[in-house]
Amino acid sequence: MAKLIVKKFGGTSVADVVRIEAVADNVEAEIKRGNKVTVVLSAMGKSTDELIQLAKSINPEPDLREYDALVSTGEQISVALLAMALLKRGIKGKSYTAYQLGIRTNASHARARILEVEVSKITSELNAGIVPVITGFQGMNDQGDITTLGRGGSDTTGVALAVALKADECQIYTDVDGVFTTDPRVYEKARLLKNVSFEEMLELSSSGAKVLQLRAVEYASKYSLPLRVLSSFNNGEGTLVQEEKNIMERPVVSGISSIDTEAKLTIRGVPDLPGIAAKILSPISDAEIEVDVIVQNISAENNTDFTFTVDINDAKQAQEILTETSKSLGGGSVEVDEDIAKISVVGRGMRAHAGVASKMFQALALNEINILMITTSEIKISVVIKKSEMARAVKSLHDTFDLDKELDT
Ligand code: ASP
Ligand code: MG
């Protein structure tokens, strides 16, 4: 039976006309297989970065309505070019902006959330044998203004469209072969994963793996829409991100992610009283700074140290806020450490297996890697260590959990 497939291509996959022609070939091949295709595109190469630079050269903090009006233009270029390339092949490609289709979002410019996707137009185009080529990353708010979905937001457009169209599959094309056991640039023994569960992908994405926008994974997971991550440069099956119950194997550890773009902040000597964590973190979240790992030390003489990590770009602002908080609480010094990395070991099989943590800590100890912070979830154990030890930690853990070997189930 004919399938309906949403294909989303990222920036590197449409970086120049040669790549755009390759995308057109991909679509043509899919149609020849008898399937219906809807395409979602990112902007060409680094053009979104360039647009953001342009905006910032006028004003480092540009008006957000105008920021969105500007940065959404990148996608408009790529969709028109692909439609032309399809038409050249005798395929009825037709470009659409999110605005033309009515992809409705909430009001928050530069990181809008999709509320509703109107698909009647796309459906009738598909029925007429047309291949709709749709701008990723953008939408419109209630005012009729253009919004954008945050960096990497085309993934979310692809997923939202696939959900709304009840597509059989959403394929996310990128410049890597799929999701790996760890970043192949960090360790050459990294192995391509055939399957990964939504939950694992969420943990991996939020702790460093950049193949998919986190929000896109959340969206796909909410609607149980299978996502396939694959390369537009090489042939291959890529990685299927899907519901855990559909995956046969249960590896204890599926992957290791690493991230070295966080900073650690410590506030010393705050009174150890009920409500202290809220007093420290509320002003941080009021400033819309996302907090990741949190540790409160055991108190000595009714005073405690409180440590957490934030994105490195937010470190300065967080430090300023924390310094104020410390004054008002009668606390001590505030320290910032940017020389850190977070390593996370993720696996759906952890639920049924004890001992992963101790195996992980032993491996780090053998390598004389000092652990600064620890945090866990049901399927993840993360440690914060010194940045210079990141690659060594990833390699030793990858070896410890035999991630280079395929399970023989
Ligand atoms: N072009 C946008 C960006 O670079 C959206 C995307 O590529 O997903 O962030
Ligand atoms: Mg992307």
Image (cartoon, helix red, strand yellow):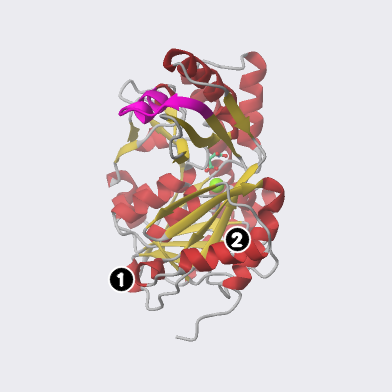
Residue 355, given in percent of the width and then of the height, sits at 44, 69
**For mark 1, what is the residue?**
245
Please say if 231 is above or below 337: below
Measuring from the top left, give residue 229's x and y in whole percent.
50, 61
Classify 10 Å Cα crowding around label 2: few (below 14), some (14-19), many (20 and above): many
Q: Position of residue 371 (x, y in %)?
A: 58, 51
What span is colored magenta in the figure?
267-282
In the displayed structure, 171 sits above or below 138; it is below
Which SS class for mark 2?
loop
Q: Nearer the viewer, residue 356 or 94?
A: 356
Q: Is residue 391 above or below residue 401?
A: above
Write down the quadrant of residue 111 in the picture. top left
- Tell which circle, 1 or 2, labels the residue nearer the N-terminal end: 2
Task: Look at the numbered disc 1 and say if its residue's Cβ is closer than 8 Å to ligand 2.
Answer: no
Q: Is residue 277 one of those drawn in magenta?
A: yes
Find residue 273 and report its image quarter: top left
Neighbour class for label 1 at 10 Å: few (<14), some, many (≥20)? few
Would you say residue 138 sits in the magenta stretch? Answer: no
**Residue at horizontal 46%, vertical 39%?**
297
Residue drawn at 69 percent across, 53 percent down: 389
* Residue 276 in sight: yes
Q: Of all residues shown, which one is farthest toward the bottom?
A: 408
For label 2, the residue is 232
Percent position of residue 173, x then y? 54, 57
Residue at horizontal 37 percent and vertical 78 percent from the top: 248
